[in-house]
Amino acid sequence: MISIDVSVRSAPYKIYLGENILPQLAQELKKIHPSSALIVTNTTVGPLYGEKVRKICNKGVRTEYLELPDGEAFKNWDSVFMVLTKLAEMGADRKSVVVALGGGVVGDLAGFAASIYMRGIKFIQVPTTLLAQVDSSVGGKTGMNMAAGKNMIGSFHQPSAVIADSSVLKTLPAREVSAGIGEIIKHGMLADADYFADLEANMESLVALDSGKTAEIVAGSCKIKSAVVAEDEKEAGRRACLNLGHTFGHAIEKLTGYGTWLHGEAVGCGLILAANLSQKLGNLTKEDVERVRKLLERANLPVRIEGLSVDEAIRAMKGDKKSTGGVIHFVLLNKLGESYVSEVPEELVREVLVEGGYVA
Ligand SMILES: NC(=O)c1ccc[n+]([C@@H]2O[C@H](COP(=O)([O-])OP(=O)(O)OC[C@H]3O[C@@H](n4cnc5c(N)ncnc54)[C@H](O)[C@@H]3O)[C@@H](O)[C@H]2O)c1
Ligand SMILES: O=C(O)C(=O)C[C@@H](O)[C@H](O)[C@H](O)COP(=O)(O)O
Ligand SMILES: [Zn+2]
């Protein structure tokens, strides 16, 4: 097992990575010494790993269990309220802890509920998708969707620990593995050209989840994200770069209906659009854009979306959290491994969308 420090000022914590490390949860609970625990999972992950995690928790603390409906379409207030209701019914108090067992949807929902129950109780992330292990479980962004847009309601609430057991990835469908790779490629593009090149050298091993290389890559992504979050916990500046590809991606998720495109797929498509935009601005070379496209394709991620309306996409992107006064801000690249945030003339955005398959 290895550990990575997330040195946020509010409350530093560790990410634990390794195979068969779920028992580490017992150690983390011992440190917190909670009055009770609630495991929040969903109807897919619960039957696979719920009992195992419950046994680990139950040894040290009275533990209750809740399964939410599965899917991005359920990342909403009803699910958050189910968690809050369960906490109240089990008599959870300020010393109780929430254990989020699942992918990014469960992590975001359970973390958000923990952040508002009695004005905030502790939570531990036990991420079970590749995407959650490299991205969503780290950094303390929690929340839920609205019809108006992705993650429109939420909070910053750091977990007390992240326990990412690679053995649970064995049951993950291939499409979900690819979605996770979308965020991994994002990390290379925004912060680390060497990491990007390492992905180019090892993409097939990653797609197959070959153990040694995958562990190295997961740790690499966690380090990149942790460093950015430690520098800017609440997205006052630098952290916005972790949103590379998301201005486009969140619009795709919203316009196609939550869950139709997986988050990581929409981000992958957003990465190529962001790369094209960066090329139009004279920063990225054509060759670099091709490197991004090839890497996404090797990860079995879609690089085009046909038929969405340019006007609707622009409208959706104006509702992005990085927009101010109706002006959209994009994360762009100076070069591979170096990102910045800027407004962009709308005409250029429209051009990129049309070239990417949108309808004018
Ligand atoms: N908070 C953040 O910083 C952050 C970062 C990235 C993404 N997100 C959010 O995360 C969500 C996407 O997360 P995701 O890709 O993990 O999707 P997800 O949580 O929907 O999980 C994907 C699917 O895999 C299933 N699953 C999970 N673990 C499994 C396992 N081990 N074996 C078999 N099936 C398993 C789930 O039940 C689900 O059907 C989006 O809502 C996105 O907005 C948040
Ligand atoms: O941690 C961050 O910061 C990110 O932007 C990571 C993203 O991968 C993630 O999808 C995040 O939830 C997007 O945040 P949002 O503020 O754009 O909703
Ligand atoms: Zn994301």
Image (tube, rainbow, N blue to C red):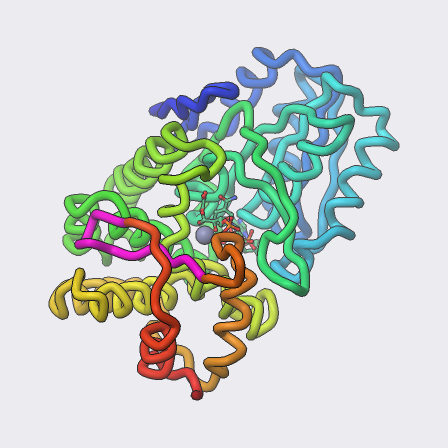
Viewer-nearest residue: 102 or 137: 137
Viewer-nearest residue: 286 or 320: 320
Answer above or below: position of 185 versus 31: below
Q: Which residues are magenta?
A: 328-339
Q: Is residue 325 part of the magenta span, yes or no?
A: no
Residue 58 drawn at (x, y percent):
69, 22
Q: Which quarter of the figure is the N terminus placed in?
A: top left
Residue 137 drawn at (x, y percent):
49, 38
Q: Is residue 175 visible?
A: no
Q: Is residue 118 visible?
A: yes
Viewer-nearest residue: 59 or 282: 282
Residue found at the far right of this picture = 89
Q: Is residue 331 part of the magenta span, yes or no?
A: yes
Q: Which quarter of the figure is the C terminus placed in?
A: bottom left
Answer above or below: position of 173 versus 54: below
Answer above or below: position of 204 versus 168: below
